[in-house]
Amino acid sequence: MKYQKLGTTDVKVSVICLGTMTFGEQNSEDEASSLMNFAYEKGVNFFDTAEMYPVYPKKETQGKSEEIIGNWIKNKKNRDKVIVATKIVSNHPKGIGATKLAWIRKGGKSLRFDKHNMNKAIDDSLKRLKTDYIDLYQLHWPERNVACFGQLDFKYDPSDNDWTPIEEVLENLNNLVKLGKIRYVGLSNETPWGILNFLKIANEKKLPRIMSVQNGYSLVNRVFDIANSEVSIRENCGLLAYSPLAGGRLSGKYMNGKQPHNSRFTLWPQRFDRNNTVRGEKAIRKYVEIAKKYNIKPSTFANAFVISRPFLTSNIIGATSLEHLKENINSLDVTLTEEMIGDIEDVHLSDPNPCV
């Protein structure tokens, strides 16, 4: 396993992070424990979750992913050996969808990064995770309107001014740091403007520095390359890449109309439609063919590309089976050649970012 520093800290996280949004929905607790055991044995020390998980979010299962991780850590007695990351939700309309997450605190517009919400959210997460501190606490998505979750272009709305000021958000996070409830903070689904302003205000006001940004990134979604990549490298605020397989589609398992049992597109086809596009399917077919050309599993190949990026801190992989998990972790053993990279770029430049 390879390890890299988390931002400017001395904390070393595995280049592969195990994402857990299927725990408690697609995966039972026993299955999830087996996946965590295998990943841990392979050197993975970084686990990512969120207060709203598992997905598809609903009242009956909300927080179950954190609970499963908490039980696993308690049984393994390895809290000091793992890095736990979780997230707090906000009111961004693209993030919460039609449900408005009404069962989390008061849901809807009340979900903000104010002191009340943050204190309640952190205490609930700590309880579910059965720990007294969280290593990396992330803002799941901005309160303000930003382009994310299938939206590429920023759509200006002059009425979009009712969000918690960045300085206030950082002060609330700083309070949690002082209380020992969190160690470091990160962003998610953020833009260059957001990252730079969080960094600027943190530096000016001596508030917690942003150590990472968790955004979507894959062969079919390289929007991060356009501007965030330079910010990430020059500001030492690395990417935690989520959805490196575009929701599993880059594995090739959905090609030719296949609908694998218990897979997310089979269960919730509308939830992840941004990864299910005509343009995307054409590109995915080409990437699968490239992987086969080099006798590499498509999922292994796709993850190897993400891991190769210079701005990456950790690649957040997901898996509902040990077979899938092994394929994903095997990406560490793949070094992309110039010929492979050339093949990738030919496809990318012919139709960039078909699944944003």
Image: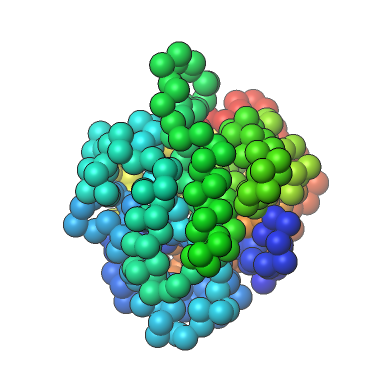
Q: Is residue 307 visible?
A: no
In the rendered view, would you say 166 is above or below 173? above
Q: Which image quadrant is residue 167 in?
A: top right
In the rendered view, would you say 166 is above or below 103? above
Question: Which residue does the image show at 71% across and 44% down from the upper left?
Answer: 203
Judging depth in this view, the residue of 322 and 182 nearest the camera is 182
Q: Which image quadrant is residue 224 in?
A: top right
Question: Which residue does the image show at 49% across and 49% down from the upper left?
Answer: 172
Image label count: 0
Question: Which residue does the image show at 44% across and 31% down from the upper left?
Answer: 163
Judging depth in this view, the residue of 60 and 176 nearest the camera is 176
In the rendered view, would you say 221 is above or below 214? above
Where's residue 77, x and y in %?
A: 47, 86
Quarter that holds the N terminus: bottom right
Residue ranking furthest to the top: 158
Where's residue 63, x and y in %?
A: 31, 60
Q: Is residue 76 visible?
A: yes
Query: Coloring scheme of the render?
Result: rainbow
Where's residue 333, x and y in %?
A: 68, 66
Question: Which residue does the image show at 34% across and 68% down from the upper left?
Answer: 128
Residue ranking furthest to the left: 60
Q: Is residue 40 left or right of residue 53?
A: right
Judging depth in this view, the residue of 278 and 86 nearest the camera is 86
Where's residue 106, x and y in %?
A: 24, 44
Judging depth in this view, the residue of 298 and 229 nearest the camera is 229
